[in-house]
Amino acid sequence: MTTRCNWLAIATAGALVSPAGHAFPYVVQPGETLANIAARMYGSPGREKVLVDANHLDEKGGIKVVPGMRIDVPAPEVRRTAAGDTWGQLAQTWLGDSKRAEWLAKANQALAWIPPSKGQAYEVFPVIPYVATESTLLTDIWVRHREDPKWAWELNSFNQREGGEVKPREVILIPLVDFHLTDEGRAAARLTANCDVTDRTALGAQRLAAGELPALASELEQGHYVSALVRGSRLLGMGDLTRTQMASIARAMLEGYVALGETRLAIAACGAWRENADALTLDPDMISPKILAACNNR
């Protein structure tokens, strides 16, 4: 078994279609079928079609696999942003086209026109190729992997095509957004490669922080300073947050410490705010004198 991550791709008409997603290798064990492998990896035997398409197996031939056969299991992968990255650049790199920026940003609860923070953990969803062996409908391809056919038009959006009919030998890339492994699936991925294990914890922490920052701001507005400081400390304790999140939390804690008269802690919080904020300007018309005083005592 190989020990590195793979990127699925499919060649057609002598050209390489855009990268089709992250996958890890799995060796079929005695007595296994694609259905029970899908159940173990994805939590549903109905997702065997994902394994069929990802491995270009002949569905009409019975979808047979044999012990010792190596298959690729599509899975999301976590990456980190670098300075200056945009969702368009990341989509070009991992999804094959910058026009898919909205897909990548939305999958990470972000907006495509707002650049991600440096060091932000983000998830790249797997994309698998479907090759039509005969004329078929886009809705039929969609329901192979999704239950509701009314959203099949999204395949046209992702593939930058029009029409509801798919011709023989046409390749349709299928984005598996919100597609996750079971605990057993993640364990299998860790056995075969070091892919994204380290960054996945950071992704969870950053998403949790994003969900709690509005509550932190609300506590400050309502004057619940102790609760805000407890929440802020807990968020910082989760670990690898983005610099933007760290700056927001430090700014909130600065306000809380100032309100409670904790000057020493307020000074430290302002230092953390300065360290993580980009081009911080302390405007005396926008910031209270007590906060300015704490920040000027660094």
Image (cartoon, helix red, strand yellow):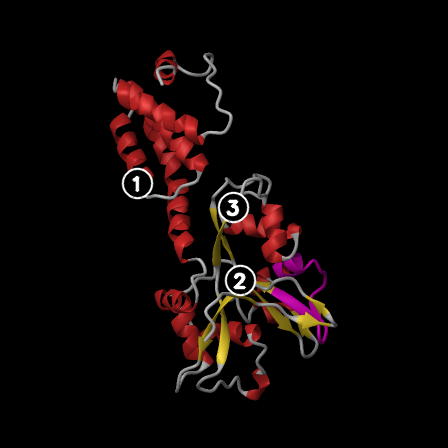
Residue, disc 1: 237
Residue, disc 2: 126
User: 10 Å neighbourhood of mark 3: few (<14), some, or many (≥20)?
Assistant: some
Would you place residue 47 above or below residue 238 in this image? below
Magenta segment: does it hold 116? Answer: no
Q: Earlier in the sequence, mark 1 or mark 2?
A: 2
- Percent across and percent down for residue 262 are 25, 20
The residues colored magenta run 154-173
Amino acid under label 3? Thr
Tell me which residue sits at (32%, 29%) in the image. 219
Residue, disc 3: 81
- Percent across and percent down for residue 6 are 53, 67
Magenta segment: does it hold 155? Answer: yes
The secondary element bearing badge 3 is classed as loop
Is there a contact, CB below 8 Å, between mark 3 and mark 2? no
Q: Earlier in the sequence, mark 1 or mark 3?
A: 3
